[in-house]
Amino acid sequence: MMDFNVPEPEWLDQPRRPLDFDGINRAALASLPSLLRRWLPDGRKEAGEYVARNPCRNDRRPGSFKINLDTGAWADFATDDRGGDVVSLLAYLEGLEQGEAARRLAGMVGLEAGGSKPVVLTVAGSSEAAAPVVGNSAALDEEPSVATEPAKRNDKTPIIPAPDDAPPMNFRHPKHGLPSRTWEYRDGEGRLYGYAARFDFVDADGVADKEILPVTFCALANGRRGWRSRGIPDPRPLYRLPELLARPEAWVIVCEGEKAADAAADLFPDCVTTSPMHGAKSPHLTDWSPLCGRQVFLSLDNDDAGRAFGDAIFGLLTRQDPDAFVGELELPSNYIVRDGQVIERGEPVPEKWDIADALTDGWTPELVEAERAAARASGAPGMFAQGYLTAAARAEYAADSEAAEAAAAARKAEAEENRKQGFQLGANGVYRWAEGAEGDGKWTWLCSMLEIDAATRSEHGEEWGRLLIVTDLDGRRHPWAMPMSMVAGDGTAYRERLFSLGLRMAAGKNAREALHRYLNETRPKARARCVGRIGWHGSAFILPDAAFGSPGNERTILQSASPFDHAFKVAGALDAWQKAIAAYAVGNSRLAFSIAAAFAAPLLAVTDSESGGFHFRGASSIGKSTALVVAGSVWGGGDRRYIRSWRATDNGLEAVALGHCDALLCLDELSQVDARTAGSVAYMLANGAGKSRAGRGGEARVPATWRTLFLSNGEIGISDKMMEDGRGRRATAGQQVRVVDIPADAGAGLGLFDALHGFASGDALARHLKDAAGKTYGVPARAFLQAIADRQQEAAGAAAGFVREFVTEHCPSGADGQVSRVAARFGLVAAAGELATGLGILPWPAGEAVRAAARCFGDWLTARGGTGATEIDEGIAAVRRFIEQHGESRFTPWGAEDDRPNEYKATVNRAGFRRYRDGAIEFYVFPEAWRTEVLVGFDFKAVNAALIERGILLADKDQRTTSRHSPPGVPAGSRFYHLSPLILGGGRDG
């Protein structure tokens, strides 16, 4: 059963107002695209219509089920089910009465059921309210207004079966009072599940009307229990099920409603009678398996709805049992009984006439039996019956009997093919053909509904799999792309996954082997492309549960042997996120920058930009984590939120990065990573490539690759973290360019914030943002992806223009290439923020993202200390550090020092000589020590040139970097790197 998670009004607390069907339908039309995406997520727009698979039947592919986007009228041309508005559509999908569907729909579109007062959503800590989600048909082509996963109501949960100590059913309708009649629904063991309750009333026009509602015993809020109007969870039991099972040889009459079933039981006491709950509304939600192998006759109402009900039941019964006999009960409705005599009615049979009306017309069990006996005596069937003709068969016979015979032959051939394959889908799941000892056999239940929807494979024709769809006990459909490699073993792995999705299957070895054959031998006609990671794949962006853009002529889905653990969840509406979170980023450079960075992640591939990260560095409790929480809310959240931890192995973080390809990655608290691996892990994340590994046979496996933009935080930076291991390691220039340190303190005395927007303190604003991020999340990124997926070239051109302009305006002229690279990444963040603003996703004034990026870039540049090449500055610093640390211990004195007599001293691990003259000290470093110790890891030639330019390294007369000298104890004229006294006192530029 589909669960729209919309809380219904509390009947016991307040009366319902009269229903305004027209107003509700008008409001629903304004929101129809959003509603359809929620109800029928696998659909698509085609020429003013929304085309999707019908979840109320075993609909393999879209095509027959269509909804008009302008009027809300809908039809399934395969079953001839149809309706004229959105209320009737919801009633059909959910199996509801029209009134209840109208009430639920009113709640979805932000109306009270009886009027037009909007229902608004407020976010804790904010006085503003979010408007209801609305949209139009164009929104199906452009960015959607998404609203999913509203808060669930758990205050009326059916207890199935009803406990023995439950009081008698005493449910009272707030307007109509006690029910005029009730019908019990019990399971096969006779345990009470609930009631169908009928309420008769007179409407405002004085016309008699009725309302039939389900009533179950429910667990209520605060530990209370009581009878409430809540449906029986599907699959629902048939009406009169205990009697049906107790009389296995009796013929079965299926009626459209409990009242008709009771009347049929009176008129045909040798038969058992039944009905699905809600009659014709939702027969697909009933368990029809008890009718397997039974002789079944349908008793239909005299209208189009009755005929549609018959077609639906015929389809359900024959799908679960192709050999099922399904007939039609034809009590002669054009005859009535007067004074004990059967006479012609003399007028047309009334609209909606059913078998219950036969009692009013005077029929009795004795008269029915007499007519049946007369029919048997004349050689007619022993019941008022004939074989059932479906809508398709009726049309065929009316048009061409030969076509009907051909169609019947085709159906028989299909049934025979199913029998050869050994499997078929029925109303209650998958059935397997079990051969009998004498060559006969029967269809037996294998498992609950498990559809093999498509064969999957990679773009290279490898990694074949099956797209499976599991329907759980709640009626939810769970797609899973299973690699066929999982069928190579004993099946334990894939069964565990299927069971976790809600599959139920028969017990025993035979069932396990049959399921193995079903998955391995079934050959689906449809094809789908499988991918092993999220992100861009051509023109499509793939998330674990959604795809954006045009993947080509076939579906593209994420395929994984194990459950894909992710936080790309969705809750709330876009406008609620804008008001509760994004609005507070205006004027707050760090917040605005973080949010814009979240939108920049999918632009990396679009603009062919390199991966990288931004690290917020600052003292504890300054608000660093708030920036990550706010940015993460763009992409997802939920119970575990969106933020991941640095505390993981490099292999673990490699998997995390792959799971965030082309999306934002948030890593909390750098202090948790091992200092020995901090640099390599950070570079791996920013470089977008994992380790090279060997396969089972020693062959080289393709390393994992990704693109990601990540945000991180910590009290120290990457370079400082690397130095914690005590080995004197430093962050290379490449690492510092890929992972940029930004001071978390905005400098306004408010920690992370520049402005508080009316909050009493930075802590209060941070608490509000974190609370709001736990309630509304994931919507903005999907809206952004929907907008740019089919316009990648346009987005790339706009972003490139933003980046060029940003670098030109904010990067100092003459800056080193490293600074220009970093400026371009800041520019991409600015571009993403401005694009999201232009699309209406960010509620910011134009230029806000640019201002935030420029401020953060300037603060980074100031903290960096200049615009030169990092390697050169760090190389000079390394030489100075070596002399400061080892100037006394590893350099042998040459000549007099401090007027003391020259005395030879043994120097351990000597690196060169030091010479005191003219009141200053010069150093002479051995070439080998210079290259392997002093400047190890640097481009020493480039550093040498910079040292000479600054007057620190003294070249010889031929401008060679080494010069000849003759200190004691070494061959005369040996070459050294000659450092001037400036090594300890600066250079020509300070």
Image (cartoon, helix red, strand yellow):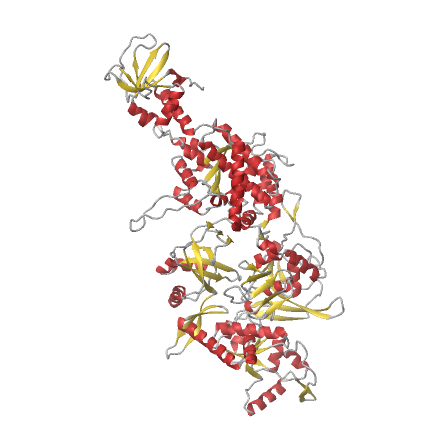
70 versus 918 height, above or below: below
379 versus 19 height, above or below: below
Please name the residue shown 30% across and 24% down the image.
929
408 sits left or right of 18 in the view: left
The residue at the far front in this view is: 958
The answer to which of 833 and 679 lies nearer the viewer is: 833
Asked if one can make out residue 300 in the rendered structure from this viewpoint, the answer is yes
For the N terminus, give its image quadrant. Answer: bottom right
State the image coordinates of residue 78 (x, y, percent, origin top left).
Answer: 55, 70
The residue at the far bottom in this view is: 377
313 sits left or right of 129 in the view: left
160 sits left or right of 653 in the view: right
State the image coordinates of residue 868 (x, y, percent, origin top left).
Answer: 45, 27
State the image coordinates of residue 581 (x, y, percent, origin top left).
Answer: 59, 42
The answer to which of 499 and 880 lies nearer the viewer is: 880
Q: Quadrant of residue 99?
A: bottom right
The answer to which of 508 and 605 lies nearer the viewer is: 605
